[in-house]
Image (cartoon, rainbow, N blue to C red):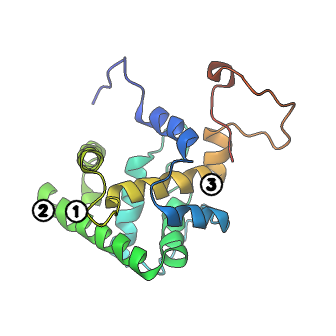
Amino acid sequence: MEPNKDQISRKEAIKRTGALLGGVIFAPNILGLLNGCTARPDVDWEPVLFNRRQARLVSTLADVILPEDDTPSASQAGVPAFIESMVNEVYNDEQRELFLTGLDRFDEESTIQLEGDFYDMTDEVKYEYTHGINRVALENGRDEDGNAPFIMIFRELTLLGYFRSEPGATQVLRYEPTPGRYEGCVPFEEIGRTWAI
């Protein structure tokens, strides 16, 4: 799929979204950040809450949202383990059930519509399907109980985990361990990237 030259890349759009993380849609995610939850790359991630199928879906879906290019993918940055940690340790029972139900529903519906497992599809098919689900979620907004759609919660967790990881904070965002002098108003073009937390 060849992008329109007038459009920015998906990865660039995600990078810019990092600047907007203050406007989160799901309150428990802020609590997790305040408690110090951080994504750490872990090749041997062993799911505690998720079953194997759920863990595989979480890893695949996170990589659809943030694929590998010149920076590591979401799974390479440890985002799937971060997502499970947030859902298992920060969310209350009702929020956890809402997430797990949404994850299972995403799995069931994608299997039916794609006529196969989501994680076995080509990257383009996974992206198109996820993009369509996200577009519908943005159009419909929250449900009658005020709950955000699963894909929006998942996307937010993916972004939070990624930009709290070492690769996200140092390779995607600008990072300076000891920043220089304060400059309150600098054109974004001069900076080039949003600063890490």
* Mark positioned earlier in the residue sequence (1 or 3): 1
Q: Residue 181 at x, y = what percent?
A: 87, 30
Decide: is 134 above or below 174.
below
Binning the other alpha carbons within 10 Å of mark 1 as few (below 14), some (14 to 19) or many (20 upward) gives some
Q: Tell me the residue that label 3 is attached to.
A: 165
Disc assigned to residue 117: 1
Q: Residue 125 at x, y = what percent?
A: 23, 46
Q: Tell me the residue that label 2 is attached to.
A: 112
Q: CA distance from mark 2 to mark 1?
A: 9 Å
User: Would you say the residues marked 2 and 1 are in contact, meaning their CB atoms lie under 8 Å apart?
Assistant: no
Binning the other alpha carbons within 10 Å of mark 2 as few (below 14), some (14 to 19) or many (20 upward) gives few
Q: Is 131 situated left or right of 99 in this image?
A: left
* Mark positioned earlier in the residue sequence (2 or 1): 2
* Mark positioned earlier in the residue sequence (2 or 3): 2
- Of the two numbered discs 2 and 1 in the rendering, the one whose residue sits closer to the viewer: 2
Indicate the amino acid at tag 2: Ile
Indicate the amino acid at tag 3: Ser
The secondary structure type at the circle numbered 1 is loop
Q: CA distance from mark 2 to mark 3?
A: 34 Å
Disc assigned to residue 3: none
Q: CA distance from mark 1 to mark 3?
A: 28 Å
Image quadrant where one finds the N terminus: top left
The secondary structure type at the circle numbered 2 is helix
Q: Quadrant of residue 147 in the image?
A: bottom left
